[in-house]
């Protein structure tokens, strides 16, 4: 491998950003293949998990916990509501805010797609040994931690506890 000449586009192909984007495309493709019968995207799956773990969260909370811009979160949630996987309830004190809860159909969806999600994760990590898998996850987490706060849409993990506390006050 070391004796091979560099590809004419190596300056593109070896850029970390290019490689991360390609890895993301591959991960999405594998997920879509494994979840094809459920017509669920990775972002929709993530939103279902957030709402299932944090009943009553609002759309802004979902966007903060997943690192989504507000319009993307709105589209994802609207789609899940239209499919009757999530339900919205107006806040009694603020008519602009809607609390979200997972429906029984949404719970069934999470159960039905769980095996496919596990297969997708296993397929994605298949090229690596167990030690390499742990290292890959650690390195990705370090990269995310180093730059999360400077992105346009940071993941705000604190929003989980803050939302839980706020919902406990309702």
Image (cartoon, rainbow, N blue to C red):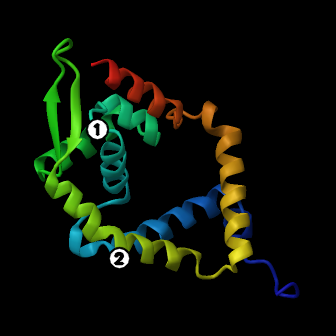
Q: Is residue 43 left or right of residue 143?
A: left
Residue 169 rendering spot, x and y as whole percentages: 33, 18
Position of residue 147 relative to residue 159, above or below, is below
- Residue in the image at 56% along x and 66% along y: 23
Furthest residue to the top? 93
- Residue in the image at 73% along x and 70% along y: 10
Instruction: Assign a secondary structure to mark 1.
Output: loop
- Residue in the image at 74% along x and 64% along y: 11
Q: Nearer the viewer, mark 2 or mark 1?
A: 1
Residue 138 rendering spot, x and y as whole percentages: 71, 57
Marks 2/1: CA–CA distance: 27 Å
Residues at marks 2 and 1 touching, judged by CB atoms closer than 8 Å:
no
Which residue is labeled 1 in the image? 55
Instruction: Assign a secondary structure to mark 2.
Output: helix
- The quarter of the rendered structure image containing the N terminus is bottom right
Q: Which mark is residue 25?
A: none
Position of residue 141 relative to residue 18, above or below, is above
Position of residue 12 relative to residue 70, above or below, is below
Instruction: Give neighbour class at mark 2: few <14, some 14-19, many 20+ (Cα, 10 Å).
Output: many
Position of residue 2 relative to residue 52, above or below, is below
User: Quadrant of the rendered structure where residue 135 is?
Assistant: bottom right
Which residue is labeled 2 in the image? 34
The foreground one among 26 and 47 is: 47
Q: Is residue 43 left or right of residue 142?
A: left
For marks 2 and 1, the one nearer the N-term is 2
Residue 14 rendering spot, x and y as whole percentages: 72, 66
Residue 126 rendering spot, x and y as whole percentages: 58, 81
The foreground one among 82 and 164 is: 164
Q: Is residue 105 left or right of residue 64?
A: left
Please indicate, yes or no, whether residue 19 appears anywhere in the rendered image.
yes
User: Quadrant of the rendered structure where residue 116 is?
Assistant: bottom left
User: Quadrant of the rendered structure where residue 115 is?
Assistant: bottom left
């Amino acid at each position: 491998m070391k004796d091979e000449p560099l590809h004419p586009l190596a300056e593109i192909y070896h850029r970390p950003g290019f490689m991360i984007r390609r890895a993301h495309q591959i991960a999405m493709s594998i997920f879509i293949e494994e979840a094809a019968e459920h017509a669920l995207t990775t972002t929709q799956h993530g939103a279902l998990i957030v709402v299932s773990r944090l009943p009553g969260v609002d759309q802004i909370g979902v966007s903060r916990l997943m690192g989504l811009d507000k319009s993307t979160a709105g589209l994802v949630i609207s789609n899940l509501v239209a499919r009757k996987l999530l339900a919205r309830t107006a806040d009694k004190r603020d008519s602009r805010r809607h609390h979200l809860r997972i429906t029984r159909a949404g719970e069934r969806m999470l159960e039905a797609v769980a095996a496919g999600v596990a297969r997708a994760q296993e397929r994605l990590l298949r090229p690596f040994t167990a030690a390499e898998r742990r290292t890959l996850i650690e390195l990705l987490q370090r990269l995310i931690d180093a730059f999360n706060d400077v992105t346009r849409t940071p993941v705000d993990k604190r929003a989980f506890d803050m939302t839980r506390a706020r919902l406990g006050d309702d």
